[in-house]
Image (cartoon, rainbow, N blue to C red):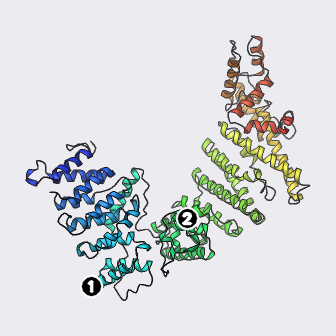
Amino acid sequence: MSVQETEYGNIDDATELLEQLSLKPPSQRKIKISNLVEHVCLIFSAEGLSNTVLSRIIDIITLPNELDQASRCKLILNLYPTDKVPSNIIFNVVSSLGHGQSKPLFTTQSALLKWLAFIYDIIEDHKAFSKVYSVLFNLLDTVAIRSHICKLLCLVTQRKHVQPFRIQLLMELNRQFGNESALIKLMQVFKGQFPDIILGPMIPGNSNIFTEKDQEWRERLFRIQKDKNVAVGFQKISSIIPSAYTANTRENSIILEDMRGFPDLVNNLENIEAPNQLVAVLGTPIIQKYLLLKPSESCFERIDNWLLAFFEEELECRIWETSRIVEMLQAILHYTQYTKILPSACLKYFDVMLTSWDGIQGRDIILNLLAYLPLDTSRSVLDSIFRRLEEAILDEGIESKLAILGFYSNLLRYWFACLLANPEKSQAAASSINAIVVHANELALTVIQANHDVPNISFALKFYETASFLAGNTRLRNKLDLIIPPLEAIYMMCFTLSISILDRVCAMLVTYKTAFQLIVDQGNSDTNITQDKIDSARLQIMRLNSCLVDLCNCFWHSKAFNTSDTNALGCLLSSQVQKTLKDYVAYLGNSFELSAMFGLSLSPVTFLMARSYLEEKEKSVNQSEKHRGVITPASLQLLQLKGGLDISWKEFRLGMLQSLEQKGVTGMPGLIYSTLKQFKPVVSR
């Protein structure tokens, strides 16, 4: 039974009953209202309440009725909205504050003010507080609720709210009532917006607006809103990242804290003063946009200096896995993903931290951060980082290898993007990129050999495809070395049960061959292409041709593992392995030879597609005599003799390639077209 299925009915029925009972004196009630309040509070704290129910409950709390004070406060403590709170509810609460017979008791008002501070981050329109700012400020002379009003005003005060008459009233209240911590805190907020205020000597105010118990309430609200898929705007109150703060400003200056959206930022970009706590950029999107539109070396240096001080303090503890450091690294990751710039302080921190890291705590965060290593990082630093990473992470399992391989893929992808933006850096980066590709090529081969599951092979192939981006980009391939994957890896990927992987491998090989051929063809006319690069391209073409011949022998010629053709390597299978496989095929007792079992009509990955293509051809001519069994040259001839579809083996294979292309499988046909001489005119056209 859910919390809503009780004697009081659902939440709407219970709310309606509460409205009715709150209007009756206790002596006229047939139901004990405290039990009903307990019931609705249980629902609110477990599942939250909609804005419709919230509005009705606020009316019960704020309007004159017979509900006792304890019940009102209990209801307020359990108001967990499931949606963004609309402005009309804010206005209703604020209108209930102050003096008067129709107003709730000050205890209730204090609880309502505290609740407004709690939900400040999930208000639908923050302009609502600006509209009632004068009302709230004018209630500061009410002693019973002043501390809670001050806390709320500390959250909602903007630069436009700081006016001389308000400053004068605050200073008068401070002289009249002494050093109240909440009042001093509000004065400090005003001084931050208007530095010319002279506060004089006073006891420092409490910097924490919310207590630990308050934070528990907000954490529950966060969980409820998250369960309801509501975008929660606030962060943890205990965040270690300082808030944006601009001091020593002029009265007519414009500060980032006043910006309420991207249009405001763009319209005032040239006149905005950078905040004193620039490190707030790690958790403040508006400052991130500001630095993106108006970058400054001094600003980035200030951020680095703050982070260096933070990391040094954490390293003194000798325990990097504290929640503080994980939270900071997570914030830096969000910032880095947005700006694509890794703070140099992080690099210095990792250089020390990685020596004692266990390779498990915060692995994803660290790898994602290091995927933004600057392109101009020295080889010695890179080698040190990569070595320590692999020593900490790699073990006997496949997951650790996939994690490192994914890191190398992300790093290459980032570096390639940097090179496209700054092609002049390609010469300096060539050594680092080549080293990563060569090393990670072998790691990917290890992944393929260790576990032949399709997801793992696909992950390894993803790295090879990332590295092949150079081959397909005209701006980079003439400036950087192109390194093809090991032939062992290519052959193993081609003999999986996935048409997707096979097609991706074929497309990658065609990309490489086209790139090498262009380098050779353009070598005489392009002065950027050295003779060494041309000679290297010719050697790579020879290696690729061997692979392409082997694959065409498998798919097209039905001569799998043949080594008699020029350049053929027989897919690197030794004669002993081939003999074993042939014996196994003979043991199965079918009429097919091993060499023919990887053709278009027999291969496990294309067999069903071949059957489907032939059936579609038969339907298109309304043929009554259907083909049965495996498609071979002999079976097609027999089909023709029986009066069935008249199609030759060559026509079938050509049609099959076209059918594959129509289905989005373009890599394998492309490989055959670009390799076999009979298709050269087609490729040229």
Q: Nearer the viewer, residue 15 or 499?
A: 15
As drawn, 174 above or below 423: below
> Residue 325: where, in percent of width, then height?
49, 68
Residue at the left extreme, as displayed: 27
Left-right relation of 199 to 313:
left
The location of residue 92, given as percent across then percent down, is 29, 60
Q: Position of residue 119 (x, y in %)?
A: 35, 61
Q: Is residue 90 above or below residue 312?
A: above
Q: Quadrant location of the C terminus?
A: top right
Q: Residues within 10 Å of mark 1 (few under 14, many from 20)?
A: few
Q: Position of residue 149 (x, y in %)?
A: 30, 71
In the rendered structure, the answer to whether residue 478 lies left or right of residue 196 reads right
Q: Is residue 359 visible?
A: no
Q: Quadrant of residue 480?
A: bottom right
Residue pictured at 74% horizontal, 41% vertical: 506
Helix, strand or loop at label 1? It is helix
Q: Is residue 183 visible?
A: yes
- Residue flagged by tag 1: what amino acid is it? Gln
Farthest residue to the bottom: give it.
201
**Which amino acid type is shown beneath numbered disc 2?**
Tyr
Relative to 385, residue 172 above or below: below
Residue 150 disc label: none
| Camera-side residue of 376 and 68 | 68
Between 513 and 421, the one lying in front of the other is 421
- Identify the residue position indicated by label 2 in the image: 335
**Tag 1 residue:** 176
> Quadrant where the N terminus lies?
top left
Judged left or right of residue 212, residue 674 is right
Closer to the N terminus: mark 2 or mark 1?
A: 1
Q: CA distance from mark 2 to mark 1?
A: 46 Å
| Residue drawn at 56 percent across, 67 percent down | 267
